[in-house]
Image (cartoon, rainbow, N blue to C red):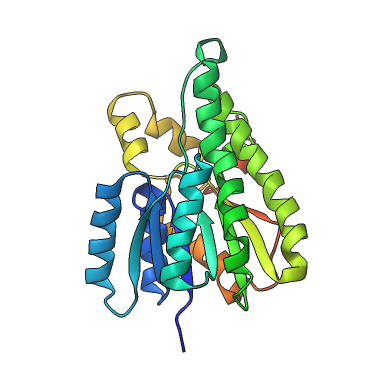
């Protein structure tokens, strides 16, 4: 019996890397994609060494570029034939007041964080249709539900991703392709750790607002993504699941 196969965009760094690891750990073949070929190669080599019983492959793909996405899916079809799941984790963020955000910067965030998921799902449609229990998991953010000053492009893209998730879930439900969204809260990635070290992020203040009193670890997000992609979530579609330690429910002053 062949193993299920997942494509993870942005799968070589941060939360995406943890997601790639989680699927391989759970006996899935993993296709790691992104724009950084060296990071992809490093992640593929690491996962192959850790999980030699599964197939781990890499493909360079820029989710903002339709031709790049199309070329990547030609490669995926030739090498794997079908897909069981797609995880859209590719994303960027620009932190500036709106007055300082250029048109190019705005579009770069929207094109990566929102349009990228659209382009990948559109290209993945045929391959997902070959699987018995196919799924898509988009990786959004609590920024899709709350305002965060200085991140207009990012919050707009992540809010749009929630609407995209609901509509695509309805559109693909007759084909038995489930579509869900995971919205992480503050997570201890290299980017966040860098912000803490530079003094741009106040970890103590964040912890005081998070119900569980700490940042998430990337694997805690990855485990929820895996659950939604797996048959264990066979009756879940069109949902956004916040994985935020309770920060968005905190109404305390």
Up the image or down, 76 lies above or below 91; here it is below
Up the image or down, 194 lies above or below 98; here it is below
Where is the C terminus found, in terms of image quarters?
top right
Up the image or down, 153 lies above or below 90; here it is above
Q: Is residue 52 left or right of residue 8?
A: left
Q: In this view, does 233 lie to the left or right of 33?
A: right
Q: Where is residue 116 in the image (x, y as percent from the top left)?
A: 54, 43
Report the front residue among 32 and 231: 32
The residue furthest top is 99
Does residue 89 appear in this view?
A: no
Q: Position of residue 87 (x, y in %)?
A: 51, 57
- At a point 34% along the width and 52% down the height, the residue shown is 12
Q: Is residue 48 left or right of residue 164?
A: left
Does residue 72 appear in this view?
A: yes
Q: In this view, does 203 lie to the left or right of 128?
A: left
Report the front residue among 83 and 133: 83
- At a point 41% along the width and 75% down the height, the residue shown is 26
Q: Where is residue 13 in the image (x, y as percent from the top left)?
A: 34, 48
Q: How many marks?
A: 0
- At a point 46% along the width and 31% down the height, the residue shown is 93
The residue furthest bottom is 1
């Amino acid at each position: 019996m062949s193993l299920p196969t997942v494509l993870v965009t942005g799968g070589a760094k941060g939360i995406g890397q943890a997601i790639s690891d989680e699927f391989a750990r759970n006996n899935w073949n993993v296709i790691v994609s992104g724009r950084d070929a060296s990071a992809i190669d490093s992640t593929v080599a690491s996962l192959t060494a850790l999980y030699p019983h599964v197939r781990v492959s890499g493909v360079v793909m820029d989710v903002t570029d339709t031709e790049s996405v199309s070329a990547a899916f030609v490669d995926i079809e030739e090498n794997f034939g079908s897909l069981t799941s797609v995880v859209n984790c590719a994303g960027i963020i620009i932190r500036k007041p709106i007055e300082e955000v250029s048109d190019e910067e705005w579009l770069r965030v929207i094109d990566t964080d929102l349009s990228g998921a659209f382009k990948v799902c559109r290209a993945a449609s045929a391959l997902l249709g070959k699987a018995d229990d196919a799924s898509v998991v988009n990786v959004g953010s609590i920024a899709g539900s709350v305002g965060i000053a200085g991140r207009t492009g990012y919050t707009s893209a992540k809010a749009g991703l929630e609407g995209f998730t609901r509509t695509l879930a309805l559109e693909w439900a007759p084909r038995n392709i489930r579509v869900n969204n995971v919205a992480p809260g503050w997570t201890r990635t290299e980017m966040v750790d860098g912000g803490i070290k530079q003094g741009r992020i106040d970890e103590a203040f964040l912890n005081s607002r998070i119900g569980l009193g700490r940042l998430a670890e990337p694997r805690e997000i990855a485990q929820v993504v895996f659950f939604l992609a797996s048959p264990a979530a066979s009756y879940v579609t069109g949902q956004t699941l916040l994985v935020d330690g309770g920060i968005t429910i905190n109404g305390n002053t």
